[in-house]
Image (cartoon, rainbow, N blue to C red):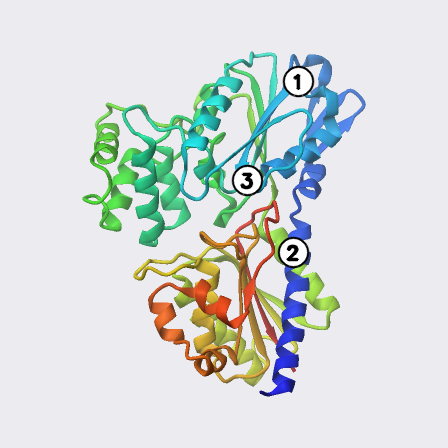
Amino acid sequence: MDLSATTERKQLQETATAIFLAAIKAVDPEECVNRRLQLSGTDLLVGGDFYPLATIGKLFVVGIGKASAAMACAVEKLLGDHISDGVIITKYGHGMALKHCRLLECGHPVPDASGVEATAILLNFVAQATADDLILCLISGGGSALCPAPAVGITLADKQAATRLLLASGATIHEINTIRKHLSRIKGGQLCRAANGARMVSLILSDVIGDNLDIIASGITAPDPSTFSDCLAILSRYQLLDKIPAVVHQHLAAGVNGLAQETPKPGDPVFAKVRNHIIGSITDALAAAAGKAKTLGFRPMTLTSSLQGEARQAAGVLSGIALLSRRSGQPVQPPACLLAGGETTVTLHGGGLGGRNMEFALAGAMTLAETRGILLLSAGTDGTDGPTDAAGAFADGTTAGRAEALGISLGQHLADNDSYRFFQRLGDLFITGPTRTNVMDLVIFLVGR
């Protein structure tokens, strides 16, 4: 065993971890909420808009997403007894103690029966509001799966089957959420229809490329520019028209023919009293990561905040840039920290266990093989990568060789989409537990001297 290489790897892993945690701190829900929400005397200030408390009948709080419980904690600290009531829906294990809001936990990324029940409670809760009330909505990534309200004629099992097919197809989150909106009674701005004309203000942590309001949590409080026709085009693109449940296909076709209600579009009067505010995104996380890298002696460079495409292909490209930096000092001279944020996809071909970040790291290990002094960390800012307990994984130039010494085939694990078990055996999983925030994925390449 090369002890110097082992020591170098461990030091770079510690550095990458510190950079990742600095990024997470920058998008901490409490920090983000407090930047946009203030109580000034008898006025509630939200993103530059004033809401005099004397003009508010009741103040309700609703939350949807992986970070919603943490966001609700921050709101409760600030507003306390001004809150009349609240309902917060989050992923199992992501809850926090709340005083003024009811906490409901349910399944993600595939919706479950608890999610259906929680969403029904949420819709009934919002329906009690009047035009004099204010509903403060706390929205973050994961909301699409956590709030299933199947359209009439569609069952939870139908939505689960459609979700699994879409997740395995390589479809982007924009495409997946376009379909989710049109199979729902709450997504695509439809929560606003249930609010009886109450004022609604949404504080949103973005987990999508471009920060599109209509895509984050499937745009629960935002106008939806997509259509039923778009849904059929997406299913056709991924050859899923004959695979999805027949009732789903029939519902979408009925919508195309005007026999099912469309989601509310931009300009719809239902949004006249609705305000949406982005309070945190991958841009904030990348800036903090770059700042931390600099303090640790690395020259930071952000390559993109819109990383997308197949995980293994994106990994090859970015790993190539890291190799170029190591060999020629371009585009940045070592010691360097190359950063990227976004959300790749994985088209499943095997039956293994893993997520897009671990697959990214596994593919990156192939490109970096036998190159010393480069470390890769790819991880989800929510602390979860796919259906696993890991946020992502570390990889470097020794990964392939160490695996081979243990009789583990990197290529076979990549072909089987079995990245979790690969990195588990090497001891290179990156496990953080729930971070209670969510702004897509963060990729860190450290290039040593």
**Mark 1 secondary-structure assignment:** loop
> Residue 17's quadrant in the figure?
bottom right
For badge 1, the amino acid type reads Ser
Give whichever of discs 2 and 3 has the lower sequence position. Answer: 2
The residue carrying mark 2 is: 23
The residue carrying mark 1 is: 84
- Give the spatial CA distance, label 1 vs label 3: 22 Å
Q: Residue at x 66, y 18 (%)?
A: 84
> Residue 98's quadrant in the figure?
top right
- Give the spatial CA distance, label 2 vs label 1: 34 Å
Whether residue 345 appears in this view of the structure is: yes
Relative placement, left or right, of 26 versus 390 is right
For badge 2, the amino acid type reads Ala
For badge 3, the amino acid type reads Ser
Q: How crowded is mark 3: few (under 14 residues within 10 Å), some or many (20 or more)?
A: many
- Give the spatial CA distance, label 2 vs label 3: 17 Å
Q: Where is residue 340 in the image (x, y as percent from the top left)?
A: 54, 62
Q: Residue at x 61, y 15 (%)?
A: 133
Q: Nearer the viewer, residue 133 or 74?
A: 74
Quarter of the image containing the C terminus? bottom right
Relative placement, left or right, of 360 versus 4 is left
Q: Compared to 168, does 225 lie above or below?
A: above
Q: Compared to 55, does 40 lie above or below?
A: below
Q: Which of 117 and 245 is in front in this view?
A: 117
Give whichever of discs 1 and 3 has the lower sequence position. Answer: 1
Q: Compared to 400, does 340 lie above or below?
A: above
Instruction: Please state which of the two labelled residues, at mark 2 or mark 1, is closer to the viewer.
Output: 1
Give whichever of discs 2 and 1 has the lower sequence position. Answer: 2
**Mark 2 secondary-structure assignment:** helix
Q: How many marks?
A: 3
The residue carrying mark 3 is: 140
